[in-house]
Amino acid sequence: MWFKSSKLVCIFLTVGLIHCGEVHPEKLTVGEMKCSHCSMNIVDMRFHTQLITYKGKRYHFDAIECKNQFQKDKNLNIEKIWVTNYLDTKEFLLEDQAIIVQSDKIRSPMGAGYAAFKTYEDSIPFQK
């Protein structure tokens, strides 16, 4: 009996520890989630931004400017922030490694014109 219980404990610990690794951005479906700042549906995935705190609370935003204002208004202990690559909506970039551009050529959901790019070269056509 003792052997069966210890086996179960080992299985649960293994499964639990596997899920305690590095955090990753969540993939969303268009219109599935509302922005944590302005409550608009997230429908243009080119501007989708995510923030996760050290406590594991995840926030989703429809635009980089919403994330910026939310971050300014709240006092959060932030673990990671991801921005979507404007040219590839399936690719998330860490905010501190992305090239973020503000331009009149970019029509973001909130109108401030912020977009994230993987490389400086990718961002050149969108700069002022």
Image (spheres, rainbow, N blue to C red):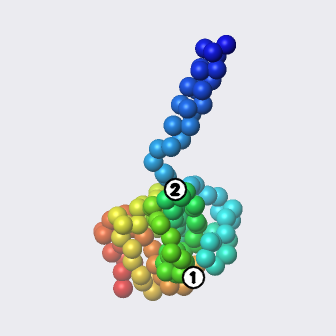
Which residue sits at x=45%, y=61%? Answer: 79
Q: Amino acid at mark 1?
A: Met
Residue 58, by quadrant, is: bottom right
Q: Amino acid at mark 2?
A: Pro
Q: Quadrant of the C terminus?
A: bottom left
Q: Measured from the top left, where is residue 40 in percent x and y? A: 67, 75
- 109 versus 83 height, above or below: below
Closer to us: 114 or 19? 19
The circle on residue 25 is: 2
Which residue sits at x=50%, y=43%? Answer: 20
SS type, badge 2:
loop
Which residue sits at x=47%, y=65%? Answer: 78
The circle on residue 57 is: none
Q: CA distance from mark 1 to mark 2?
A: 22 Å
Residue 74, by quadrant, is: bottom right
Residue beneath label 1, please? 110
